[in-house]
Image (spheres, grey):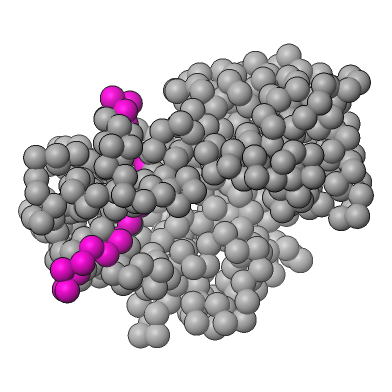
Amino acid sequence: MQRFAALLDALSTAPQRSAKLRLIGDHLATTPDPDRGLALAALTGGLDLPAVKPALVRALAEARVDPVLFRLSYDYVGDLAETVSLLWPGPVRGEPPSLAEAVERLRAATRATAPQVLAGLLDRLDPSGRFALLKLATGALRVGAGARLARVALAERFGLPVAEVEEVWHGLAPPYEALFAWAEGRGPWPEAGPGAGFRPFMLAHPLEAPAALDLAAHAIEWKWDGIRAQAVSAPGERRLFSRDGNDISAAFPDLVAALPDTPLALDGELLVRSPDGTPAGFHALQQRLNRKAPDARLLRELPVFLRAYDLLAEGGADLRPLPWAARRARLERVIACLPPDRFDLSPLVPVADHAALAEARARPPHASIEGVMLKRRDAPYLAGRVTGLWWKWKKDPLTADCVLMYAQRGHGRRSSFYSDFTFGAWGPDGTLLPVGKAYFGFTDEELAWLDRWVREHTVARFGPVREVEKALVLEVAFEGVAASARHRSGIALRFPRIARIRADKPAAEADTVERIAALARP
């Protein structure tokens, strides 16, 4: 457990992706089985410990320390695991458990026994070990290392093809003995088998010089504003995968049920269909994301469909080595045989020259289009981002001048800074209305300046949140505007980031809700 705790601590402060890859790879190479496999499962979301919930952790902490002290500390720190790990009283009793022991005991715990089991494990750990245990138990591992990064780290450390690791991943289970045997040359590649497995996505490079491309050699498609997904079926098995290889079938049972009972693998964009049959905005899809079991109302009011881009496999044949043109011809035939309310074909964009391409990219016919994709007609479907085959040319980001309204403490190495900023625009009655929240886009120096400004201009406090004077203007860059019932303004910015601190601009000159909302209209 202590080795896993040291890994989490190092990952939370490692600033670069390369450093995180090295840390994870070294841990997997030097940690014995089964702890390394369980660490990999924890980093990739493969562990489920349902008996431990945040409410249980809070109750345990308040039973061991003064509840007032706990609440004050939690308000200041802003992270439950960190607060409890530091406040947990008494000396460490006994040998620290291994990661395997901790997982085994928590897996076997029931709701009735979980408090005693968790308290016993916490008593045997120092603060860093307690922090790691609580993050593991509650499934709140946020250390800047997602599931795909962990798989890439494994592949790079052991010299494995990343695409092959991705392709067999969903046929494996923790603690991944067969995977490590293959990685260390002690066993064969653990083949995925004939089921509905994941195939790594082909990705595009940003297009920097469109005039240099031969348009006749490329097919041009719209880049839709949903989430990239892969729908896969086999006899008795149907699955839906996200771009990073996570199985999201349970969140979209309406689409999964419409897949055929034959071998098929489709690459496309997951979208919500509006009542008029066109794609709804991303805000509609957002209501369907991250739900393990959507209710009947969501399924009825926000039906999803897959706008197909590519055909990866059909009838047991792997089509990825074929050129795009051949795959497209087969895709058109396949889509014609699938339920039209759940599957349709991403249309091609006819353009005569580069000027027409630039016009299409700048002024697409639908608000749910982010830009254009250019794909070589002779390109096979290759995993990853391969130079010279696929390009994406997105619309220029939108910007708005907004006023800082609230600031909240961050997490991890930012837990002592106010780094999460809620900002607003002026409503029709002259009041500020929230339109979004951002926590990146600024340098460390700018973060220190913002943190100091927040402390000096606080007008009210709400636990870890501070309300500030409505005086600081932030230039916010974003990729779209969505309708939002959660915001009093009725809108929310999509993927906002702080582009610039406009300390020179009076707050009265910031943008209005009406002007920002107009950006949502094509």
Question: Residue 128 at x, y = what percent?
Answer: 69, 24
The relative height of residue 315 versus residue 419 in the rendered view (above or below) is below
Residue shown at 90% from the left, 43% from the top: 116
Residue shown at 59% from the left, 68% from the top: 252
| Residue 434 sits inside the magenta stretch | yes
Q: Nearer the viewer, residue 486 or 234?
A: 486
Question: Residue 198 at x, y = what percent?
Answer: 62, 49
Q: Quadrant of residue 514?
A: bottom left
Quadrant housing the C terminus = bottom left
Q: Nearer the viewer, residue 268 or 275?
A: 275
Left or right: where 184 falls relative to 108: left
| Residue 318 sits inside the magenta stretch | no
**Region in magenta:** 427-448
The relative height of residue 374 versus residue 179 in the rendered view (above or below) is below
Question: Residue 193 at x, y = what percent?
Answer: 75, 47
Residue shown at 27% from the left, 64% from the top: 433
Quadrant housing the N terminus = top right
Question: Residue 497 at x, y = what percent?
Answer: 30, 45
Left or right: where 374 falls relative to 156: left
Residue shown at 54% from the left, 27% from the top: 12
Left or right: where 55 falls relative to 217: right
* Residue 126 seen anywhere in this rendered image of the structure: yes
* Residue 193 seen anywhere in this rendered image of the structure: no
The relative height of residue 518 versus residue 67 in the rendered view (above or below) is below
Q: Nearer the viewer, residue 63 or 6?
A: 63
Q: Nearer the viewer, residue 337 or 9?
A: 9
